[in-house]
Structure formats: structure tokens, C-alpha cells
Image (tube, rainbow, N blue to C red):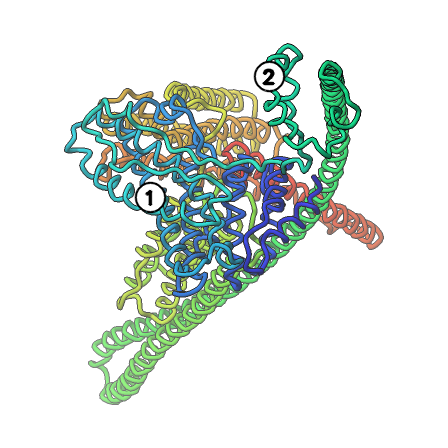
Amino acid sequence: MDAGKMTVSINKAINTQEAAVKEKHARTCILGTHHEKGAHTFWVAVNRLPLSSNAVLCWKFCHVFHKLLRDGHPNVLKDSLRYKNELIDMSRMWGHLSDGYGQLCSIYLKLLNTKMEFHTKNPRFPGNLQMTDRQLDEAGENDVNNFFQLTVEIFDYMEWELNLFHTVFKSLDMSRSVSVTAAGQCRLSPLIQVILDCSHLYDYTVKLLFKLHSCLPTDTLQGHRDRFMEQFQKLKDLFYRSSNLQYFKRLLQIPQLPENPPNFLRASALSEHISPVVLIPTENSPPDSETLIETEDLVGMDSSSHQGVPENKFDDIFGSSFVNDPFNFNSQNGMSRDDKDRLIEQLYKEIAVLRDDFGNFKAESHRLVINLKGRIQELEAELAEQKHLREQAVDEYEFLRAELEDLKRRRQDTEKAQKSLTEIERKSIANEQRYTKLKEKYAELVQSHADLLRKNAEVTKQVTLAREALGDMERSKKELEDSYQRVNEHTQRKTEEQIQHMDDLQGALESSKQDVLLLKTSLKTAKEESRKQIQEVEDCVLQRLLEETEGIIQESLSRLDEPLYANSSISTDFFISRTLAAIESTEKIEKVWKERLSETSGVSLVLPHLLQFAYRISDVITQGAQTRASVELSDGCRECGTEALNYLSCLRNNEMESGADCSKITAALKHIAEIVQELRPPTLDIKEEELGDLVEKEMSATAAAVETAASRIEDMLNKSRTDDTGLKLQVSERILGSCTDLMQGIKALIMASKDLQKEIVESGRGAASPKEFYARNSRWTEGLISASKAVGWGATVMVDAADLVVQGQGKFEDLIVCSHEIAASTAQLVAGSKVKAEKGSSNLARLQQASKVVNHNAAAVVASTKSVKSEIEEKDTMDFSNMTLTQIKRQEMDSQVRVLELENQLQKEREKLGELRKKHYDLAGVSEGWGDDTE
């Protein structure tokens, strides 16, 4: 069947004319669902109709939809479930109208929603509710609890059927013959489906109640019996009223319920129950217009019977008056009675011959009719086959066209994703440039601070010189006093001169003391001004940095409402690790800021932690905008960003003591981590009963991998001490020594994680076995497995990278990346363990302490790697002092060419990185059960 033809039939069946739906249009819709094996075309056509603005249109839609749910393809129910919420909203909207079709549409829509819910919960029930007793037992799985719940659901289903029945009758004026009017038939026609449903539901209710009374006490089922009695009286009354309507009399035969309801307290009463059957009579062909002359009496008489028949018998047959009859041979021709008997016998024989001929003719006609009907059936079968082939061709055409449209749509989605990735990279580059500018400003501030310190040193030097001059004066005074004692014996003139000289010196001394006091005062003033200038510069830098961090977070918040970032695939493990890193930065910035208030640390320690806090909060919000898995996740990210902005605003306004607190930010981040943890579906390729063994296996494998990595590093260190000398030996010892400390920390972390895992299993499994505990908590278990694998893999890769770096063949960046990956995997392992652990657990505290040690050692690896790299680069610094102008120009051209090549290579590597991330997200989504959008 063509989809266009089905669409035309749907539009003809569901129209604004207040008349009953024509059966041929409804039948075409039903056949269309069986042809396309679903109701896609039906819903496409219905979504174009103004059902919310025309009550008659909505009423007829409900009638056709009810027919499709009963007699259409089973996939009609599956295709219709996605529109369930729209039907509920439409029912609520029509319920506000108290007259006309408003209440009818509201109740009918609620009935259809109830029917879809019933068949979804009980998939063994077909849409037309026709089941055998055996199928009914299988639907309850021979479990009394299932039968009890099934009876309650059938009661709810029947309640809405009866409610619609009663509301339709209430809306009609029964004092007039409404059933013969078009408007009345429009309202009554859907009740045919209701009558068919109610007859089956009543039958199943009776059988289920008898079954329940055989298994449960009568007091337990008192509520069931009361509800059945109420529905029995309503259904009996409605069936009786419907059977008296002229409209229903010509369409179906409505059964009548018994006078009294079944006695469920008597088990033998089940044999007296008669299932109500609704009969829909088939239309008979009209009777023939030709009448046949009954000649049985005449043909049945033979010659022997007429010999003993008196004349009046013949007269009774042919008439009593033969005076004017041409067959009155006695009066006309004087024929004797024997001649007359022979004539009659001859006529009888001719009649018998004609009768045989007529029988043969009738048999031949019947045979020809049968042959013609057979030929018609053959032609109809051939026609049906041709139609089927044509429909198959049309279906193939539609499938190929849909496939082509799907390919075009995928291509457009791919282009949009590529543009989105380019935009993200552009913004990432802009953020890097912004961070570089901030670093430059910070370097300028450090240089200014150093200049002030130098000025302070100069002032201190001047004070020292003044103090030395004062000491010289004191020594001169003592020498003069001695001289005075020696020459006092000589002459008075000399004495007076010396006294005068002493007075002069005393005046000079007093002047020097005053200069020293002035210098001390100026030094104190200079120190105070220097401190104020430094404080002003620090406050200015801090305010500008707080404004920058607020801008970063506000920009990430704006991405939550941008469609550019929607429908991306982000790994939940990666998301959780980013969230935990943000929590760590939040706690760190709160601690550092409090130390700044207590003047134990300067602004130089606050700036990097503040920048790290802003970028990690922005990273979490960006990941949430890209994931967009649920409204709750988007709201959580928005709440986290709002709290972060409020906290930064308090810092900028110096309101730390009046209410600035990071606890709300930490709570919001933990809430986001819990949401992401719940969104992660279980891995589909691992059986739940194998999870317990797999956890032990992966933890043991991780411990073995870390042990092997530590042994390899020890061997490499011993070999380097034997073979290497000079700078190479220093590089090997510093890098391998930091890697050795990191491996020791990882081993301690694995041991603490295993101890905490055992404690969690023992406290949470109850009477179940550990395997059952892991199977019951499959998502948490798979998170531990993933984190354990990541830690072991990171340790192995780090050893390989360190080996290559020591040999001079590797890159220092590989070690830095491995350190970051190990820190992230450690955070994931700790987060997964913390979810199930108790707050006061000593093993949890030991695991967190081990995690801090691992993070510290990973940072030490990064620091030693960068230090070694900078030392090697300083050794390799070129000396251009002995080069000529031509050689320098040549070197400059070569450097420019190399810069262009490196920039081109950098662009290609960035594109490659983007593709790798997309592929990683796709693979991570497949392993975690993403992509099933239709499910």
C-alpha cells in the first residue's frame, strides 16, 4: 500500500464533519499499519492536524487510533509511546471545557493512555484483548502475586472504559432518536470498540477472581469483590441501554450479563460462567427477485395414484368449471375418459422430463458458477501478487530514498561537528593567549617588586654608612679626650683651644645624630611607601585577575544554552576526573586565600591557584554543555558556575569574613559527579556474574604491572650509574629517581584501594556473596575496573617513556603527559572507592593519603623533567659571536623556514588530535552503551 494512499485515507477518516468514521477509511488505515509494520505514516499525518483546536477532529482521531491499537500491527503501540506525553497534555487541555466534545475528548485520551500503559506492562495481551484461558495463565506466569496485580490493572482499565461509556450517554439527548442522526452516530460509533474491550475485560476479571479466591483468603479479596460489584452493575446497565439503540442493533449483537453476579466464594460457580460474546453479523446478499413455481404436488402424482382419484380431486387441482375450458374434451370433442387419462399421463411424463432437464441445467449452472468463482479467485490472487510486487518495489524505493536522506543528514551532522571542533580549538587558543598575557603581566609585577626590594637595600646601605660614621665620631671623641688629658698639663692656651675644638666636635656630633635620625625616619617612610605600593600593585593585579576568572566562568556558562555544544559524546570517566580535579582546586584556593588573609603567603602564591580554579570550573561546565545528557546535569553545571561567580565576587569585594564559602561549590561539583556516575550505563560485553572475578583479576594485574614497572626503573637506574657519566648521569638519576618514588606511591595506593574494596564488600553485601555484590553494583564495579586498568597502563607507558628519555631517544613531553594521566586515573580510582565507602573509614583515609602522595610524586616527575629539559636547552645554546653577517643572514633564513615547517606541522598535529579525540569519544560511547538514542 502506498504511503500517500494511506495518508489520504487518514485525512478522510479524521475530518471536521460531525459524522461517524467510515469503515472503509478505517480499514485502509489498519491495512496500512500491517503493510509498513508500524504507525509512522499515521503519526506523520496526524501531527499535521489541528487536534488541539478542533474537538470533533480530536474525537475522530481517538476513534481511529483506538481501532489501530486493537486491530493494527503490534508495532503501532511501540511507535505511539513516544507521543504519550503529548496525548496527556492534550487530555488535560480538553478537560478544561465542560460542554460539547471537550470532556469526551479528555476522557477518551485518558482511556487511550491507560490502554497503552496496560499493554506495555502486559505485552502478552494483544491489542484486541482476545486470549485463550491458557494464554491468560501464561500472562500471570502462574504466580498469585502477578494475578493479583493484573486484576488491579484490569479494574483500572475497565474503569476508564465505563467512564467513557457513561459520559457519551450523558452527553446525548435520549428523549429523541439520536442514534439515527449523523451527530449522534459520531458520538456513538467509538462505543463499538469500547463494547468489544469491555466484554473481554469482564470475562478475564471473572476468571482471575475465581483463580485468586482459590489461592488467597476471602478477606484479602474483599476490596476486589466490592470493585467488581460496582463495575458489574455499571456494565450491565450500559449493555442494556446500548442494545435498545437502533444504531447498535444493525451493527452488532450486544450480550446481556446475568441477572446476578458470580459467587466467587463458591468455586463451582465458575462452571456456570458464560463468557459474553459480541457478535458482528455479516451482511447477507439480497434475495433473488425470481420466484419459482412449486410443482411438487403435481410432479409427485403418477398415473397409478390418479386412477383411484375421484373427479372432484382433479377438479380441486385444475378447477371445477370446464364448460368454457379448452381442455373440456367431453363437451368439445367428445373425448372419452381413457383418452383423457392418456393425455394426462403424457403430460406428466413431459413434466418429469422437463424436471430432469431443469435439474441438469441447474447442476450445470452451479458447476459453471463454481468454475467462474475459482477463476475469479485465481485472478484475484494474481492481482494481489502483482499488487504485492508493486508495493515491494515502492517500499524498496522509499527505503532507498530514506537511506539517501539519512546519508545526507549524517554528512551535514559531520560538517557541523567539524565546525564545532574548529570553534572549540579557536577558543582554546584564545584562552592560551589570555593565559600567556596574564603570565607576562605577573612577570612584570615580579620585576617591579624586585626593583622595590633593590631600592630598599640601597636605603639600608645608607643607614649602615651613617651608623659607621657615628662610630667614627665616637672613636674620635675618645681620642680627643685622651689628648686633652695629655696636653692639659702644658699650657692654658692649648687647653682653651682644645676645649673650643671639643665644642666644635660636639656640635658636629649632635648634627650627625640629627642626620642619623632623619635617615632612620626617611628609611621607615620609604619602607612604608614601598609596602603600600606593593600592596596596591598586588591588589590591582588580584582584582584584574578576579575579573578575568569571572569572565572565563561566565563564558563557559553561556555555552550551556548554545546548540553548538549539544549532542557530543564525552567519556564519563574523563568527566568525573575533571570534576574531581575541580574539587581539589576549590579546596586549595580556599586554603591559600585564608593564608593570604593571615599574611602567611603573598599574592604570588594565590595567582596560579586562582587561575587553576577558574579554568577547572570552566572545564567542568564546558564538559556538561558538551554532554547535555539530562536537564539535571545542565542545572547542576549552571548552579556550580553561579556559586563560583558568587565566591569570586566575595573575594573581589573583600567579603571573605562575611560569608564567602567554597562548600557550596564543592557540594555542586560532587552532585555533578554523582549525576555523571549515574548516567554511565553498564558495559554490555561483561556478564554480571563475571564481574567479581574480573575485579580481583584486574587489581592483581595492575599491582603486577606496577611492580614490573618499578623493577624496570630500578634496573635502568643501576645500568645508568654503571655506564653513564656527567650530565647524562645527572639526567638519569633525577628522572628515574622521581619515577621510582612515583611507582612506590602507586603501589601503596593499590594496596590501600584493595583493603578499602574488601571493607566495602564486607559492609555492603549482607548475606550475599562478593560476586553477587559486584553484580548488584555493576556500574560501580566497572568504574573500579576502568580506573585500575588506567593506573596500570599509565605506569607501563611511563616506564617506556623514561627509558627512551634516558637513552636520549624520547621526548620529555611524554613523561609529563604520563604523569598527568596517572594523576587523573588516581583521582578516578579514589572517587569510585569513595562513593561506596563510609565517611569515617580508616582505609578511606589511608587511600586519600596515598592519593596525595601519588599526586605529589607525579608533580615531582613533571618538575624534574622540566628542570632537566631547561638545563639541556641551556647547554645547547648557540654562540653567534664568531659568525659573519652573511652566515647570520643564512642562519636567519634557515630558522624562518624551520619555523614555517613547524607551524604547518603543529596545525596538522592539532587536526590529528581533534580526530583522535572524536574517535576516542565514539569508542568510549560504544563501550558504555551510548548511541541507543531510540531506546
In depth, the one of 669 and 931 nearer the eye is 931
- Mark identifier at residue 309: 2
Q: Is residue 70 left or right of residue 216?
A: right
Q: Quadrant of the N terminus?
A: top right
According to the picture, the residue beneath numbered tag 1 turns out to be 235
Q: Position of residue 609 (x, y in %)?
A: 42, 55
Residue 378 location, quadrant? top right
Q: Left of 687 or right of it: where is 470?
A: left
Compare residues 214 and 395 and report the one nearer the observer. Answer: 214
Q: Which amino acid does label 1 sit on?
A: Leu
Placement of 745 over or under 703, stated as above or below: below
Tell me where residue 328 appears, x and y as whole percent: 73, 27
Is residue 628 shown above or below 763? below
Please identify, in this view, whether the residue under mark 1 or under mark 2 is nearer the observer: 2
Q: Is residue 606 above or below residue 490?
A: above
- Per the image, label 1 sits on a secondary structure element best described as helix
Above or below residue 439? Residue 842 is above
Q: Distance between the residues labelled 1 and 2?
A: 67 Å
Q: Residue at x 50, y 51 (%)?
A: 62
The residue sitting at 57% across, 53% down in the picture is: 565
Instruction: Tell me if residue 443 can be seen.
Output: no
Residue 455 left/right relative to 749: right
Residue 139: x %, y % from top left: 38, 27
Q: Which residue lies furthest to the right in this view?
A: 886
**Who comes first in sequence, dot 1 or dot 2?**
1
Circle 2 — which element? loop
Q: Which residue: 23% across, 22% down?
A: 268
Q: What residue type is labelled 2?
A: Val
Residue at the (35%, 42%) spot, across then down: 158
